[in-house]
Image (cartoon, rainbow, N blue to C red):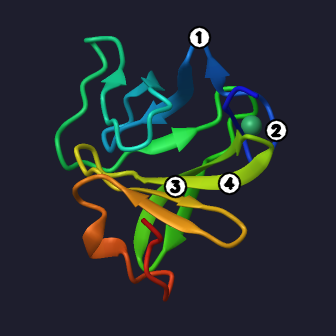
Amino acid sequence: MEKNFHCPYCHGQLYVNERIIFSARTEDHQRGLILLTPELGDYRALKHPDFHIKEGEHLDFYCPICHSNLIVEKGGKLFTRVMMLDVGEEYEVMFSQIAGKKATYVVGEKTIQAFGEDADENTNFWGVSPNY
Ligand SMILES: [Zn+2]
């Protein structure tokens, strides 16, 4: 079964043509679409060159279907949360909302996995260590 990514609120599919699609808003209220690859820990984002994102700024991510804000706070840090189905199992995928920050967490029923070079500093915020 192919991986899929969906919105936790409307369950709409965010995964189109092997990209996860979000509507995003920068700190200065620019809005644009961002496409992410489904490879966890791969932070190459596709966007239009006119949609300027500054390194280190906070981005809000919205579901492009129901427009829910996908923000979630864990341990004082802000993440974007989507649901992932992989081989029939459902996971929560959370990635940092700070542009350029490489930290993604995949939370299953019994497992937590961390991806990205900036993930380490966050690893204790669940009160558990990630399961590599
Ligand atoms: Zn939605």
Q: Residue 97 appears at what percent x and percent y?
A: 39, 51
Q: Residue at x 28, y 50 (%)?
A: 102
Q: Secondary structure at mark 1?
A: loop
Which residue is tagged 1? 17
Relative side of 16 to 6, left or right: left
Q: Are marks 4 and 3 in contact (CB under 8 Å)?
A: no
Q: Residue at x 76, y 50 (%)?
A: 89
Mark 4 is surrounded, within 10 Å at the Cα level, by few (under 14), some (14 to 19) or many (20 or more) other residues, namely many
The image's mark for residue 94 is 3
Which residue is tagged 2? 11
The image's mark for residue 91 is 4
Q: Are marks 2 and 1 in contact (CB under 8 Å)?
A: no
Residue 109, picture quadrant: bottom right
Which circle, 2 or 4, is nearer the viewer?
4
Q: Residue 42 appears at what percent x and percent y?
A: 34, 36
Q: Residue at x 54, y 68 (%)?
A: 112
Q: Earlier in the sequence, mark 2 or mark 4?
A: 2
Query: How far separated are the C-alphas under marks 3 and 1?
Result: 21 Å
Q: Are marks 2 and 3 in contact (CB under 8 Å)?
A: no
Mark 1 is surrounded, within 10 Å at the Cα level, by few (under 14), some (14 to 19) or many (20 or more) other residues, namely few
